[in-house]
């Protein structure tokens, strides 16, 4: 199973960015890249090619968010983030604040800030922001 590596673009004219430097960070991202690359209705796509500023709730500082994908289908443009379903839901409150629990809370809070910024970016540009999980990828 592929977990990370360099993706070889089959149709470089569709790719927006450098088609020789496309990196996937999970097997789920690889699967989505392959779908974007070979699906005829996808006229453009890119991976981590767009930068969106956001303020982190952890340190209150500005950071840069690189959404996983940009996809154009017909005349509709999307920003797509591929994440485990578990990370899209707020962690259940626990009595013991273990390192694992604290990490889950921090990850969720930072993701929410990123996704809010991405949603606002999309609204400003007439695009749509989408979260894709293992459920949509049928994994």
Image (spheres, rainbow, N blue to C red):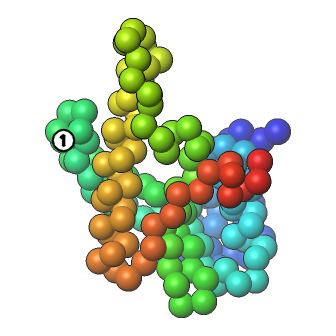
* Residue 31 visible: yes
Q: Is residue 40 above or below residue 82?
A: below
Between residue 41 and residue 2, name the one nearer to us.
41
Question: Which residue appears at 44% of the width and 27% of the height?
Answer: 92
* Residue at image mark 1: 61
Residue 105 in the figure: left or right of residue 75: left
Residue 23 image point, x, y percent: 62, 51
- Name the image quarter holding residue 56: top left
- Location of residue 120 by image quarter: bottom left
> Quadrant of the image for the N terminus?
top right
Q: Nearer the viewer, residue 37 or 41?
A: 41
Residue that extends furthest to the left in the rendered view of this protein = 60
Q: Residue at x 78, y 73 (%)?
A: 38
**Residue 13 visible in the snapshot:** no
Q: Residue at x 50, y 79 (%)?
A: 77
Q: Secondary structure at mark 1?
A: loop
């Amino acid at each position: 199973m592929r977990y990370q590596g360099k993706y070889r673009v089959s149709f470089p004219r569709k790719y927006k960015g450098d088609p020789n430097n496309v990196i996937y960070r999970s097997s789920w991202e690889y699967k989505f890249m392959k779908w974007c690359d070979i699906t005829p209705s996808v006229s453009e796509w890119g991976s981590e090619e767009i930068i969106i500023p956001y303020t982190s709730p952890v340190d209150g500082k500005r950071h840069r968010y690189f959404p996983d994908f940009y996809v154009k289908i017909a005349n509709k443009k999307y920003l797509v983030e591929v994440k485990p379903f578990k990370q899209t839901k707020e962690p259940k409150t626990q009595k013991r604040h273990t390192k694992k629990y604290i990490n889950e809370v921090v990850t969720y809070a930072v993701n929410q800030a990123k996704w809010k910024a991405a949603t606002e970016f999309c609204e400003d540009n007439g695009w749509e922001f989408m979260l894709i999980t293992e459920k949509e990828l049928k994994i």
